[in-house]
Image (cartoon, coloured by chain):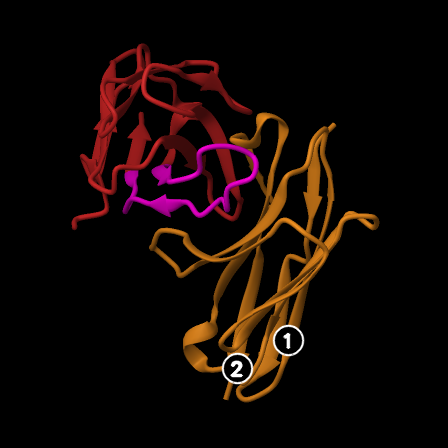
Amino acid sequence: NAGVTQTPKFQVLKTGQSMTLQCAQDMNHNSMYWYRQDPGMGLRLIYYSASEGTTDKGEVPNGYNVSRLNKREFSLRLESAAPSQTSVYFCASSPARGPASTDTQYFGPGTRLTVL
Amino acid sequence: GQSLEQPSEVTAVEGAIVQINCTYQTSGFYGLSWYQQHDGGAPTFLSYNALDGLEETGRFSSFLSRSDSYGYLLLQELQMKDSASYFCAVRDTGGFKTIFGAGTRLFVKA
C-alpha cells in the first residue's frame, strides 16, 4: 500500500496563476482532508470530505476549491494564487465513518507551494 | 471561538518523562488526538481519546478530562528520536472537522 500520495511535491507559482494539487489514498478510507501548515504553526483545515460525493468548508476555505472525484481522490484547486497561499499543503485520509469512530488521520508527504 | 492551547516548547533529558498539556475550547467535541511531526515530515498519528481516562501505547500515554476540557500526552523513557513537534487536535462539530493546536516543540538533550 502506498498510503496517501500527493503531487506535486514542490511548486512555484506566480501571483494569479492557477493550479490543482492532487491527492489519492489506497486504504479505502471514507474521509479525506486538506490542510495547510505555515512555518511554526499547526495545521489549519481548508476543506474536508466526509464521504464520496460530499465536501465541506474547514477553517480557511477562501481562495480554494475542492473536488472529491471518487473514493480514492480528493483534489485542491487554487484558482488565482496569492502570496498569502505560500504554505505546505497536506492531504489526509481517515477510516472514520462518524463521531463514534476513532479519528486516525493518515497524512501524505505534503506539497511545498511558493507563490511569488 | 475555537481554540486549543499547548506550550510552544518543552526541553527534557534523554531517559526522562515529559508531559505536554493541551486545553481546548471548541463548539463541539468528540475526541482529542495527538500527532507527532518531525522537521520536514508529515504528521503521524499517536493516540485518540474519546472518553475520560488514560490510554497507553508503549512509551506514550494520553489522558483526557472532558469536564476540564483538558488532555495531555505523556512520553516516557525519552529518546533522541522523540525530538519533534507534537500537536493536539480536537474532533469538532459533525465528527469530521478537526482543529489542531499550534504545536509543542520537544527538544530531547543527551
- Against B81, residue A60 (above or below) is above
Work out whether A79 lies above or below B23.
Answer: above
- Tag 2 secondary structure: loop
B24 or B57: nearer the eye? B57
Seen at 38% across and 18% down, the residue is A82
Give how far across and how far down residue A48 sits, in percent.
43, 25
> Magenta span has A98?
yes
Residue pointed to by mark 2: B78
Residue drawn at 52 percent across, 82 percent down: B78
Could you say which chain is coloured red in the image?
Answer: A
Q: Answer with left or right where residue B72 lies relative to residue A13.
A: right
Q: Residue B44's image quarter?
A: bottom left
Q: Position of residue B59 (x, y in %)?
A: 52, 77
**Spot occupied by residue A66 in the image (x, y as percentages of width and height):** 34, 17
Magenta-highlighted stretch: main secondary structure?
Answer: loop
- Which residue is rendered at x = 41% and y = 52% of the image? B43
Task: Classify mark 2: residues with Cα within 10 Å, few (<14), some (14-19) or many (20+).
Answer: many
Residue B23 lies left or right of residue A24; in this view the side is right
Residue B18 is marked as 1
Question: Identity of the amino acid at label 1?
Answer: Val
Relative to residue A83, is residue B108 depicted above or below?
below
Amino acid on which disc 2 is placed: Leu
Q: Does the magenta stretch include residue A24?
A: no
At a point 50% along the width and 41% down the height, the residue shown is A101
- The residue range painted magenta reads A89-111
Colour orange belongs to chain: B
Residue A103 vs B92, above or below: the answer is below
The x, y position of residue A72, in whole percent, is: 22, 30
